Image: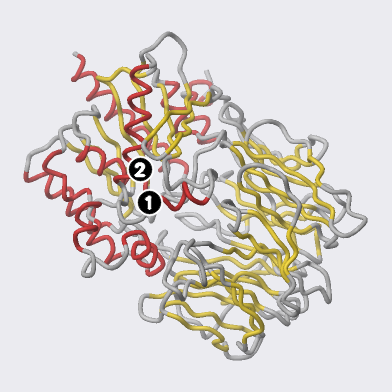
Amino acid sequence: MTDAEAMPTWEKRFRAPRVSLPDWAEDAPDRSLFVSNATGTFELYAWDRKTGHQRQATDRPNGTTDGTLSPDGEWIWWFSDTDGDEFGVWLRQPFGGGTDEPATPGLAPSYPAGLALGRDGSAVVGRSTDEEGSTIHVVRPGQEPVEIYRHQESAGVGDYSHDGSLIAIEHTEHGDAMHSAIRVVRPDGSTVAELDDTKGGTEELGLAVMGFAPVAGDTRLLVGHQRRGRWEPMIWDPLTGVETALDIDLPGDVGADWYPDGSALLIEHGYQARGELWHLGLGADGAGLTRVDTPAGTVSGATARPDGTVEYLWSSAARPPEVRSTGGAVVLDPPGMKAPASVEVTDAWVEGPGGRIHALVQRPAGDGPFPTVFDIHGGPTWHDSDAFASAPAAWVDHGFAVVRVNYRGSTGYGRAWTDALKHRVGLIELEDIAAVREWAVSSGLADPERLILSGGSWGGYLTLLGLGTQPDAWALGLAAVPVADYVTAYHDEMEALKAMDRTLLGGTPEEVPERFEASSPLTYVDAVRAPVYLSAGVNDPRCPIRQVENYVERLEQRAHPHEVYRYDAGHGSLVVEERIKQVRLELDFALRHLKEKTG
């Protein structure tokens, strides 16, 4: 028996080589950049489509995923941090290979806040630090960086126009980190126009930069807005102020990107945890809205090529991801072992205190009730979808049902659902999780004595908070890279997350201490009854290690059953073996403690 044949199915899903949707150079579309785990660590790869040649462009112990190509395809820009701490500088290397060099000399290390590359070799670089807040610089070859924007609140680079004359900036100067405004400036920083939906009304509405038209002399900017209760695109010309609404009669959230000639838009439509693509012609002779044929499941990214074909990254809960093009052809198929399939998801709609809650359910073979993992997504501005995920599939392989809840705060169900969290952060999400838990037990799916609350990042936070506020509901908890002590987390985390916490809770810990106390897992740690497993990255800037240690210390003082795993990376790992190790530890903890509980 070969090593691959002896390998557990769930491990094969992690080890099977994967690729991201290739990014291509705007003026050299045969030059592409993608991410793959082919070596066991997620790294950047250059791909010359003319010759078929591929080469690994980065090679670091903890992996690299943040990179882009210059418009002419001559340079690969990539962000270099230290062991996953997300604090670093941009480097660049020739597309064909060569030595890395500083891409933005003169700029000190920072957290990245957007990057846009010009056709003249210039770059617009967004930065964030605790001391400076948000800054944006124009960097030109052989010249000192020029600062064109600075504000203490969060801001970032949106896009750079085709001719380099306009720069779109997303900012939250009004203090609401959940709803951005847009400012368009010249390269000298002078303001051209402002679009701000947070002003003049009682509703909190956000805007998002989707990109300038990719055509010389065209100043149109594609903008996402929430004016009708969901995300959808419009076209805005910052020079004339003209806003053009788009006729897109689809439910759910709608995103968009330009076709390369600017004559049409590629529409990404998300609804009820599934995704699909549409073509929208523009102008009087436009063909209107036409569906792009994709299989049922989730489209995680898509791009229209100069020849009119569309490439997209697709998967479903049962079928592993593939990079496809219109017509169904596989664009980029990594060599080696293929990931085994898993089981399909079914939909559950549960009445909750804030409206109908959507949950995705995967069942193992056999009859219930099953031991069940409530796998809670991060964000909170994210949502689970009918997409392939190796960790839930591993639980199904071990006989567990998996329930994923798109609680209030999740995206994809309208603006009001996403914005419902404010001031009762964590507690609102757990009300929805409790409602789905009740359904799972009453429907016969879940064994009430073998319920696991689990999640990473915000999901890890909700896990610890749920164990303390719903102590009789859960048999055990698995919390990865969690917020555990909200006050300490606020003081230690990166500045952009401080801004988000001020928005969610209505101020700082000093200004609204009662809200931070009510939403902090540390407040309820003495009420926890279930065994707790925690994992944390020692270099994590999002859920820093000190606040996790504070929570662990309180568990230790109670001699409460718990285990802690600390690893040398940031907010998660890009190393395949490390990911497998973490899932293996969680499985072992769960199986051991559930066996003790049931005898």
Residue sitting farthest toward the right: 285
Ranked by sequence position, the earlier of labels 1 and 2 is 1
x and y, in percent, of residue 66 in the image? 56, 60
Name the amino acid type tagged 1.
Leu
Q: Is residue 562 left or right of residue 295?
A: left
Labelled disc at residue 429: 2
- Name which residue lies at 72% across and 57% down: 257
- Name which residue lies at 54% across and 24% down: 342
Could you say which quadrant of the image residue 313 lies in? top right
Q: Is the residue marked by circle 1 packed among few (<14), some (14-19), or many (20+) residues within 10 Å?
A: many
- Name which residue lies at 43% across and 48% down: 409
Q: Is residue 172 left or right of residue 53?
A: left
Mark count: 2
Q: From what the image shows, is residue 366 above or below residue 348?
A: above
> In this figure, which residue is indicated by the disc labeled 1?
421
Q: Nearer the viewer, residue 244 or 119?
A: 244
The reply to whether dot 1 and dot 2 touch (C-beta < 8 Å) is yes
Q: Is residue 521 left or right of residue 48?
A: left
Q: Is residue 203 left or right of residue 581?
A: right
x and y, in percent, of residue 206 in the image? 54, 62
x and y, in percent, of residue 543 in the image? 32, 56
Q: From what the image shows, is residue 312 above or below residue 318?
A: below
Q: Nearer the viewer, residue 154 or 145?
A: 154
Q: From what the image shows, is residue 231 above or below residue 212?
A: above
Name the amino acid type tagged 2.
Glu
Q: Which color mode does the image show?
A: secondary structure
- Name which residue lies at 62% across and 89% down: 190
The secondary element bearing badge 1 is classed as helix
x and y, in percent, of residue 138 in the image? 61, 83
